[in-house]
Image: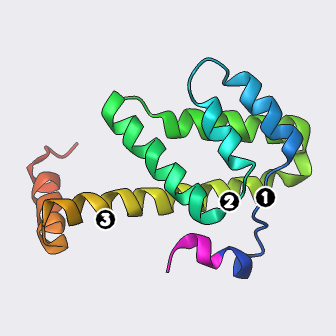
Amino acid sequence: MTGVDALPALGVEPGICGDALKVAEERLAGTGLETYVAKLSEMDLGKLSETAVELVVKSLVDGVNYVSMFYIAVLRAVRDVCPREFGNAAALLAVLGFDALWMALGRVVEMSGMDPQLLKTLFEISKSAQPSK
């Protein structure tokens, strides 16, 4: 089960104000992120999850947090154009973001052939190796 599967139970509508998406697309013009806004208007949640994974991978490859840039632009546009839909848009994007991280990390683990328990152990080791503040 993914977060997207739980959206109806949470009362989250699978859509974002079209006028706000146009504004976000304009604000992101020339960054390459405008193509991701265009995909949001399709509102096929399965495709959106895949698109979010692409954005996470692009962020990792380029070393830039495109996910946050994208979400901020979309949420600011919703707040400016369709403020009553802000809560729904924020919930939808949050769920898509967490699903994308889960899916991307799952793919990395699967492709590497790593046991997920080993990943957990590596995280624990790296946390304990960091000096406490």
Residue shown at 89% from the left, 45% from the top: 83
Label 2 close to label 3 by CB (< 8 Å): no
Label 2 close to label 1 by CB (< 8 Å): yes
Tell which tag, 2 or 1, sits nearer the viewer.
1
**Residue type marked 3:** Gly
* Mark 3 element type: helix
Sequence-first tag of 2 and 1: 1
99 displayed left or right of 109: right
103 displayed left or right of 108: right
Q: Which residues are magenta?
A: 1-6
The x, y position of residue 105, in whole percent, is: 31, 59
| Residue under numbered circle 2 | 92
The correct choice, above or below, for 77 with respect to 114 in the image is above
| Residue under numbered circle 1 | 15
How far is the residue under mark 2 from the one under mark 1?
8 Å
Check residue 106 in the rendering and tell me which mark sits there, or answer none: 3
